[in-house]
Amino acid sequence: MAAGLPIHLVVITPERQVLDERTEAVVIPAHDGELGILRDRAALMCELGIGQLRYGPPGQAKRLFVDGGFAQIIDNSVTVLTNRALAAEEITA
C-alpha cells in the first residue's frame, strides 16, 4: 500500500462541481455495499447507492452525502457523478 500518496477525487452534480481534491483514500457507497479505494486500484466503474462518501486519511475522514449516480476509478482518479451531494454540515432535520 502506498500510504500518503494522493488520489484525485472529483464529485459532480448537474448543478456544479462539488469537490475537486487530492486525498489518501476514498470510500464510496456502491449500490451493493461500500467500496474502499486506495492508490493504484484497478480501473472500475460502478453504480452508486444512497449514502456517505468518505475521503481523507483514516481517522480524519470528511463526509459527503450522495444520492445515487455513478463512479469511475481510473489512473488514481475517482470521478463521482451524482444527482445530489451535500457536506455533513449542510444536512438539517
Image (cartoon, rainbow, N blue to C red):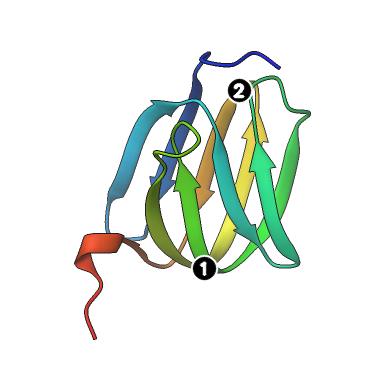
Name which residue lies at 64% across and 22% down.
39
Query: Could you tell me which quadrant the C terminus lies in?
Result: bottom left
Q: Amino acid at mark 2?
A: Asn
Residue 13, x across and y down, in percent: 37, 57
Label 2 vs label 1, nearer the camera: 1
Instruction: Check the image and report above or below for 19 versus 7.
Output: below
Considering the numbered disc 2 on the image, is that residue within a helix, a strand or a loop? loop
- Tell me, for residue 76, which label it has, or none: 2
Residue bearing mark 1: 51
The quarter of the picture where residue 2 lies is: top right
Q: Give the mark nearer the N terminus: 2 vs 1.
A: 1
Name which residue lies at 69% across and 67% down.
31
Name which residue lies at 38% across and 67% down.
84
Q: Is residue 20 left or right of residue 91?
A: right
Instruction: Check the image and report above or below for 20 versus 53.
Output: above
Count of numbered labels shown in the rendering: 2
Residue 70, x across and y down, in percent: 60, 56
Q: Is residue 76 left or right of residue 62?
A: right
Instruction: Check the image and report above or below for 80 versus 91.
Output: above
Front residue of 3 and 90:
3
Q: Amino acid at mark 1?
A: Gly
Query: Could you tell me which quadrant the N terminus lies in?
Result: top right
Residues marked 2 and 1 touching at CB (< 8 Å):
no
Name which residue lies at 51% across and 15% down.
4
Q: Is residue 66 left or right of residue 75?
A: left
Q: Is residue 54 left or right of residue 19?
A: right
Q: Crowdedness of circle 2 by 10 Å Cα count: few (<14), some, many (20+)?
A: some
Residue 58, x across and y down, in percent: 50, 35
Considering the numbered disc 1 on the image, is that residue within a helix, a strand or a loop? strand
Seen as rendered, the residue at the extreme bottom is 93
Front residue of 20 and 24:
24
Residue 67, x across and y down, in percent: 47, 70
